[in-house]
Image (cartoon, coloured by chain):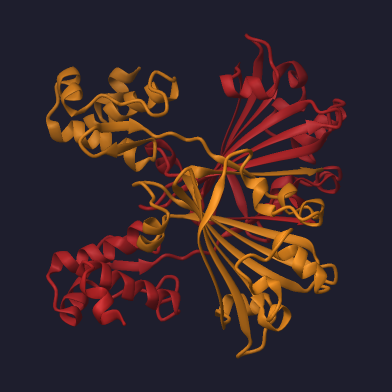
Chain colours: A orange, B red
């Protein structure tokens, strides 16, 4: 079948198809080295440029990654499983556990950058939080690292009028995190909305998440509402798509 | 600020940063034409290659797209909002509505390819559906088009032993779709799990979804369980990331 069907296709795409299928079938597993340019030149009788293009296809698809001087390797995809619904359940933060602990299943994510500021609300955020013009927000910006690799950038926005002077603005907000503190202030989150998108990263995001070529970001924007429907927090998350599987469990 | 900070950066990245900021601030809106190579060469006093690289950055980030002979335009992002939890609520399919209608908010998605087959279960699928070796599955493959643009590929897998000979295997399964038919067969879906990933598309996926450069796909794998915990369907969806926002609403 490949014979005739493949004749019209560019050679490098045929080679890329073969390599991809070998990865799919498990002939090359995560972390394995793929055949190099010289190997492909010999076995397919093609020019170096053609071999390079074929390996480039797998890299642009995020299946493989180049390591300088060592070759092209099957990308390891051992993702974090993020359970969107369980992780913000009140029985977690209500008992003083950090909701982030739910992310990791025994694997340790660490905050390696944390900055808390008070600033003018960005236009989109101010709208969601129903702020007036000139109202400020408390912003908690964090970067999370897993096994030394940055995997998540998060920025939480809370109305300054609600949280100013409270532990929400401290680097360490204490047991149960900011949701437990919001509850103490009379603004317990009761409902959440998560909106998910995906796109290619900006150059700045690629730098901060140390993304490989061909890796998109997943954007999760979570809004926390009190029982009477007031939005009290917007958390904008930017995730390395190669590091995460998001999971939602719910009834019919 | 830009002055010193920018000196170390490549010129094309500085220009790309300026253009991105102009898009973020709304100076160029969706569908607007960005300054062309000649404009950038004149206003930044750079070579054509530098101007081209700057426009290339915005394209690789998915912010802009090139139209042959016409220039580079801000990409229109007017996504479908897919409400993961509402859309499979029993009060939809239980009353004969198609669950897909929930995707579109008055915008019409159309199935332009549909193929129903019975085949050997792929390894991963057979595991989730707890099938024995050699058991077959009914596979419903569809492509959904919005405003003439393909936005979603979906493949539903159901145990053939459960649905063979029923309307589930018909091109048109009737009011309420396959979930209503499963309910009639005594296998009503009661619980769902959705798993979400994102990556760059394969060449085949890019062709079938007519994806522009720099557009990832969102993968949603939904498993439907009966009240006694049996998995009765796995639906693998591949979405044009530029066409979708996924939304999940839930309580603390």
**Residue extending furthest toward the top:** B134
Q: Is residue A161 visible from the viewing direction of this image?
A: yes
From the top left corner, tell me how far across and down residue B172 is, in percent.
70, 34
Compare residues B52 and A37 and report the one nearer the observer. Answer: A37
| Label tally | 0
Residue A68 picture quarter: top left
**Residue extending furthest toward the bottom:** A134
Name the quadrant of the C terminus of chain B: bottom right
Does B7 appear above or below B150? below
**Which residue is located at x 25 percent, y 24 percent?**
A35
**Which residue is located at x 73 percent, y 80 percent?**
A162
From the top left corner, tell me how far across and down residue A213 is, in percent.
34, 47
From the top left corner, tell me how far across and down residue B90 is, in percent.
84, 44
From the top left corner, tell me how far across and down residue A12 is, in percent.
24, 32
Does B144 appear above or below A222? above
Q: Is residue A112 left or right of residue B175?
A: left
**Which residue is located at x 28 percent, y 67 percent?**
B70
Q: Is residue A157 left or right of residue B88?
A: left
Does B104 appear above or below B231? below
Compare residues A174 and B96 and report the one nearer the observer. Answer: A174
Residue A82 picture quarter: top right
Q: Is residue B173 visible from the viewing direction of this image?
A: no
């Amino acid at each position: 079948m490949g014979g005739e069907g493949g004749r019209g296709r560019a050679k490098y795409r045929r080679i890329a198809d073969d390599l991809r299928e070998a990865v799919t079938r498990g002939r090359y597993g995560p972390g394995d080295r793929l055949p190099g340019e010289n190997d492909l030149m010999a076995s397919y009788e093609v020019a170096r440029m053609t071999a390079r293009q074929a390996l480039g296809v797998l890299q642009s698809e995020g299946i493989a990654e180049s390591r300088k001087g060592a070759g092209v390797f099957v990308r390891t995809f051992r993702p974090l499983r993020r359970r969107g619904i369980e992780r913000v359940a009140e029985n977690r933060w209500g008992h003083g556990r950090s909701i982030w602990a739910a992310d990791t299943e025994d694997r340790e994510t660490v905050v390696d950058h944390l900055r808390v500021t008070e600033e003018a609300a960005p236009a989109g955020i101010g709208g969601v939080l129903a702020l007036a013009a000139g109202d400020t927000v408390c912003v908690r910006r964090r970067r999370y690292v897993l096994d030394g690799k940055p995997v998540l950038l998060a920025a939480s926005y809370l109305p300054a009028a609600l949280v100013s002077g409270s532990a929400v603005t401290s680097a360490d907000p204490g047991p149960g995190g900011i949701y437990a503190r919001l509850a103490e202030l009379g603004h317990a989150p009761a409902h959440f909305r998560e909106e998910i998108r995906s796109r290619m990263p900006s150059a700045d995001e690629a730098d901060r998440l140390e993304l490989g070529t061909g890796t998109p970001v997943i954007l999760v924007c979570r809004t926390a509402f009190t029982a009477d429907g007031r939005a009290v927090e917007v958390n904008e998350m930017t995730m390395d798509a190669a590091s995460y599987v998001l999971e939602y469990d719910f009834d019919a």
